[in-house]
Image: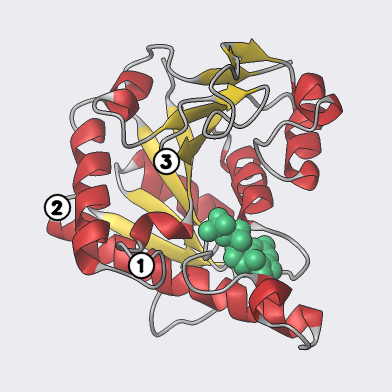
Amino acid sequence: MFKRVLLKLSGEFLAGESGFGISPDTTAQLARLITGALEGTGVELAVVIGGGNLWRGTRNGKGMDAATADYIGMLGTVMNAMALQDAMESAGQPTRVMTAIQMHAVAEPYIRRRAMRHLEKGRVVIFGGGNGAPFFTTDTTSTLRALEIGADVVLMAKNKVDGVYDSDPQKNPAAKRFDTLSHMDVVEQRLEVMDVTAITLCMDKGLPIVVFDIFQEGNLRRLFTGERVGTLIQS
Ligand code: UDP
């Protein structure tokens, strides 16, 4: 049973059919899913949200200065964090957004000890703005924040993929799903879990990861109540 968890959400989970931008309806559905799963479990939840639905570094900022393109991406994650906060609070869940890039008018600055205090009080803390540093992704933010706040696990939420496979299950019907893996397996076999910087940090610090399908009915609740779901990666 986990006491404190870090949930990594892709920015794309907030986009509607188009795959771009923020859909209030989609965001509300996701917020209800998370809030419902959390209810009554006593689990302390921190969330890192990505920004891929709005902007992805130099992939969108072709020809731009790479650091500037990444800063734009980080600002995108703050927009997502605010949208998710709004939806979670509408669903009845007290929430705080903390940003790595200070913007006092919209959110609290990230202060580790304050984040931990919010969690102890039952508030969901959403970390926006990534690490506040370019050349990283929100996968590294998940790992970093999880370690800082003493989370038991990083839950890597996926859509339509219920764990880690040896090849793409959408292209190869014979793809094999792993129940458990070591961090080293993920690195050596270049399995798609999180980027290399993030996975090596998890390996270094012995931080477990669960890769699971968040949209499969009951999965998140099962994880919060200590059941095994998806693929568990640990050393
Ligand atoms: N980003 C960054 N530093 C960070 C986190 C994010 O520069 O610590 C930027 C980077 O440009 C990235 C973008 O923000 O492409 C959006 O984050 P990410 O791609 O991780 O979002 P996701 O794919 O999870 O939606």
Q: How much space separates mark 3 and mark 1, taking CA atoms?
A: 15 Å
Can I make out residue 169 in this image?
yes
Q: Earlier in the sequence, mark 1 or mark 2?
A: 1
Q: Is 115 left, or right, of 62 in this rendering?
A: left
Cα gap from disc 1 to disc 2, whole angstroms: 24 Å
Residue at image coords 67%, 58%: 137
Task: Pinpoint residue 73: horizontal percent, then vertical percent.
Answer: 60, 74
Q: Give the amino acid at mark 1.
A: Ser
Q: Secondary structure at mark 3?
A: loop
Which amino acid type is marked by label 2? Ala
Q: Position of residue 193 (x, y in %)?
A: 65, 35
Q: Quadrant of residue 165?
A: top right
Placement of the C terminus among the 4 image quadrants: top right
- Above or below, comparing residue 17 to residue 235 in the picture: below
Q: Earlier in the sequence, mark 3 or mark 1?
A: 1
From this view, report whether residue 72 is shown above or below residue 15: below
Residue 18, numbered circle: 1
Q: Which residue is mark 3?
A: 159
